[in-house]
């Protein structure tokens, strides 16, 4: 029993060491992430008052949309994450779906 347990634990540790960097790797900026953050803000960031620049009319959001449309995903994502934090909405995980 002992002879099987030691190699098994050793292999498990090696597998964990290989998988850990992959699991914690940062998601590269992409059009999908840009779209996700913009949709999240549009859905949850709307104010119901008159003359308020939240939701789709927010200037930071509009700028992020332009950045994403031009392929500047890193800038668009950074802008959307900043506005979400500023509004205290939290930034959704990349695997978030409505």
Image: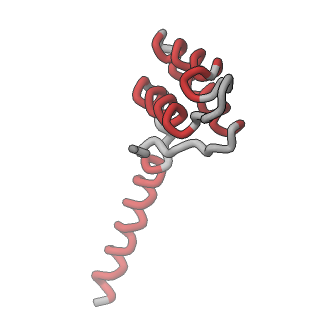
Q: Residue at x 63, y 36 (%)?
A: 84
Question: In this orientation, which residue lies closer to the viewer: 77 or 41?
Answer: 41
Please report the residue visible at 40 percent of the width from the left and 53 percent of the height from the top: 19
Quadrant assignment, res 3: bottom left
Residue 46 placement (x, y as % from top left): 57, 34
Quadrant (top left, top right, bottom left, bottom right) of the C terminus: top left
Rendering colour mode: secondary structure
- The single residue placed furthest to the right in the displayed view is 86
Left or right: 7 as drawn, with respect to 84: left
Residue 95 coordinates in the image, percent (x, y): 41, 45
Residue that protrudes farthest toward the front in the picture: 50
Location of residue 44 by image quarter: top right
**Image coordinates for residue 82, horizontal then vertical, percent:** 67, 32
Judge left or right: residue 61 versus residue 1. Answer: right
Quadrant in which the N terminus appears = bottom left
Decide which of 41, 93 is in the foreground and name it.
41
Q: Is residue 59 above or below residue 7?
A: above
User: Whole-percent x and y of residue 21?
Assistant: 48, 48
Quadrant assignment, res 97: top left
Kindly give the residue lying farthest to the top in the view shown. 70
Choose between 47 and 26: the one closer to the eye. Answer: 47
């Amino acid at each position: 029993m002992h002879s099987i347990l030691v190699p098994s634990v050793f292999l498990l540790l090696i597998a964990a060491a290989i998988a850990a960097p992959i699991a914690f790797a940062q998601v590269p900026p992409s059009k999908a992430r840009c779209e996700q953050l913009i949709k999240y803000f549009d859905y949850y960031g709307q104010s119901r008052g008159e003359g308020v620049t939240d939701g789709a009319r927010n200037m930071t959001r509009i700028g992020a949309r332009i950045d994403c449309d031009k392929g500047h995903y890193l800038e668009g994502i950074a802008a959307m994450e900043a506005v979400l934090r500023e509004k205290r909405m939290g930034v959704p995980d990349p695997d978030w779906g409505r």
